[in-house]
Every structure is written in structure tokens, then in C-alpha cells.
């Protein structure tokens, strides 16, 4: 199983959290087990909504 790491930027530092805990407005990034970024390279993203289960049962967020 692919284990992506989700980190949010909070209080001046990156902190690992569960993806499903992302909230609207969180600055976050995703990396694979080797530390490589996904889709957008190492780009940091802003969550446009709280994390939700999509129609396929996968946790997702919309980004801004």
C-alpha cells in the first residue's frame, strides 16, 4: 500500500498529520515514502475545503 505523508505548515514549521484531518485554509504538502512530491512536485497547496470522502471512498480536498 502506498503511504503518502501529509504535512501542514503551522506556527512556522511543518507537522505531519493524517490527510483526513486537513481543514479549509491549511497550507499542506504531500510526499511519497521516498520524500518525493506528488503531481505538483514539492509545491505547497492550500486546502479549499475540509477533507471529505469522495464518491470512491477516498479522502480528498479541493485546492485553491
Image (spheres, rainbow, N blue to C red):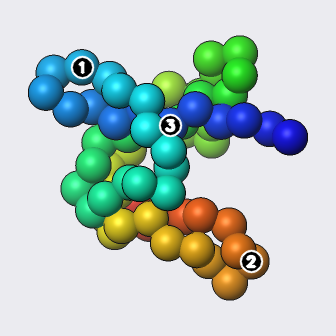
C-alpha span from label 2 to label 3: 20 Å
C-alpha span from label 1 to label 2: 33 Å
Q: Secondary structure at mark 1?
A: strand
Is the residue under label 2 in contact with that under label 1 (CB below 8 Å)?
no
Would you name the residue on which mark 2 appears?
Answer: 56
In which quadrant of the rendered image does the C terminus lie? bottom left
Q: Give above or below for 18 relative to 61.
A: above
Would you name the residue on which mark 3 appears?
Answer: 6
**Apparent side of residue 1 relative to residue 7 in the rendered image (left or right):** right
Q: Give above or below for 9 relative to 61.
A: above
- Residue occupying image coordinates x 64% and y 21%: 36
Q: Secondary structure at mark 3?
A: strand
Residue 14, by quadrant, is top left
The picture places residue 37, in percent across and down from the top left corner, at: 59, 28
- Residue occupying image coordinates x 44% and y 38%: 17
Q: Give above or below for 57 relative to 62.
A: below
Would you name the residue on which mark 1 appears?
Answer: 13
Q: Give above or below for 29 relative to 47.
A: above
The picture places residue 13, in percent across and down from the top left corner, at: 24, 20
- Residue occupying image coordinates x 49% and y 57%: 20
C-alpha span from label 3 to label 1: 13 Å
Q: Secondary structure at mark 2?
A: loop
Which residue ends up furthest to the left in the rendered image?
11
Foreground residue among 43 and 52: 52
Which of pointers 2 and 3 lies earlier in the amino acid sequence? 3
Residue 15, by quadrant, is top left
Q: How would you rate the neighbour count of disc 1 (Cα within 10 Å): few for under 14, some for 14-19, many for 20 or more? A: few
Amino acid at each position: 500500500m502506498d503511504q503518502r505523508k501529509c504535512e501542514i505548515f503551522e506556527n512556522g514549521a511543518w507537522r505531519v498529520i493524517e490527510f483526513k484531518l486537513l481543514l479549509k485554509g491549511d497550507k499542506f504538502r504531500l510526499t511519497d515514502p521516498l520524500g518525493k512530491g506528488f503531481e505538483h512536485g514539492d509545491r505547497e497547496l492550500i486546502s479549499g475545503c475540509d477533507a471529505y470522502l469522495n464518491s470512491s471512498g477516498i479522502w480528498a480536498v479541493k485546492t485553491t
